[in-house]
Amino acid sequence: MNAVELGRDALLVILAYLCGSIPVGVLVARASGGPDPRTIGSGRTGGTNALRALGRRWAALVVLGDLAKGAMPVLLARIVTGDPAMEVLSGLAAVVGASRSIFLGFGGGRGVGTGVGTMLVIQPLAVLIAAPVFLVVILVTRYVSLGSLLGSAALLPAMGLIWLVANGAVPPAYLVYAAVGPALIWLTHADNIERLMKGTERKFDLSLLRRRRPSNG
């Protein structure tokens, strides 16, 4: 690798981090005139807390934004370099940015939506295989955190299954990402894991999916 390629790759990783750092939940709250999601619930900026703060429509926009800020850096790395390793590095940088945003004093969300966005580019079939785990766990237990933890953990066996079916025609970097990416998600859920073990974790109110935007009154 020459100096030009090294500089290019470093720039892609920096851009990926900055893209992941975009505080979509906060920006949507300001645009909608709703409460800052950092002031209620878990204090995070992701889709679940946006649902509590802003209601379904605006939360859906937050989720789409989080997906996009994970997908775009990976897609850019693919177009510019064609190197799966750079896709993975860009994906990891975006997830770190989502949970440690430079624009929010290194706070933010938990990186789940952004992580899903990266995987939708890297290997969408793995997301399709793991998604039922995420959804079923939430519906059965009503713990979004547990669904996120187990759903992300399911990505590695899902990628392994794809690797087997494809007779090894999966870039090794993708297999690494299916292990390291979920590990980052687990790190951002450290407080949730502690509450789950203590039995004090907040359960998801399914009625939020039927409610309009919460009243400011």
Image (spheres, rainbow, N blue to C red):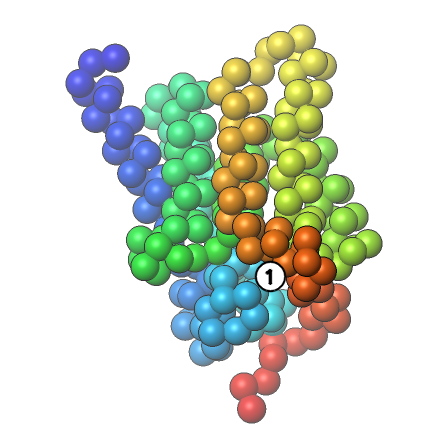
Residue at image point 56% right, 29% down: 179
Which residue does the numbered mark 1 point to in the structure image?
Answer: 48
Q: Is residue 118 left or right of residue 20?
A: right
Can you name the residue that lies furthest to the bottom here? Answer: 217
Please count the marks in the image: 1
Front-most of 20 and 60? 20
Q: Is residue 214 left or right of residue 66?
A: right
Can you name the residue that lies furthest to the top here? Answer: 167
Can you name the residue that lies furthest to the front here? Answer: 198
Residue 125, quarter of picture: top right
Can you name the residue that lies furthest to the right here? Answer: 140
Residue at image point 32% right, 34% down: 13
- Say if residue 2 shows up in the picture: yes
* Helix, strand or loop status at disc 1: helix
Give coordinates of residue 80: x percent, y percent. 34, 25
In the rendered image, the vertical position of residue 30 relative to residue 74, given as above or below: below
Residue 23, quarter of picture: bottom left
Quadrant location of the C terminus in the rendered image: bottom right
Label 1 Cα neighbours within 10 Å, binned few <14 / some 14-19 / many ≥20? many
Residue at image point 61% right, 79% down: 214
Front-most of 63 and 98? 98
Residue at image point 74% right, 42% down: 133
- Say if residue 73 shows up in the picture: no
Give coordinates of residue 34: x percent, y percent. 48, 77
In the rendered image, the vertical position of residue 10 relative to residue 50, given as above or below: above
Q: Is residue 208 left or right of residue 176?
A: right
Give coordinates of residue 183: x percent, y percent. 54, 37
Q: Is residue 198 left or right of residue 59?
A: right
Quadrant location of the N terminus in the rendered image: top left
Give coordinates of residue 202: x percent, y percent. 67, 65
Tell me the amino acid under the disc marked 1. Thr
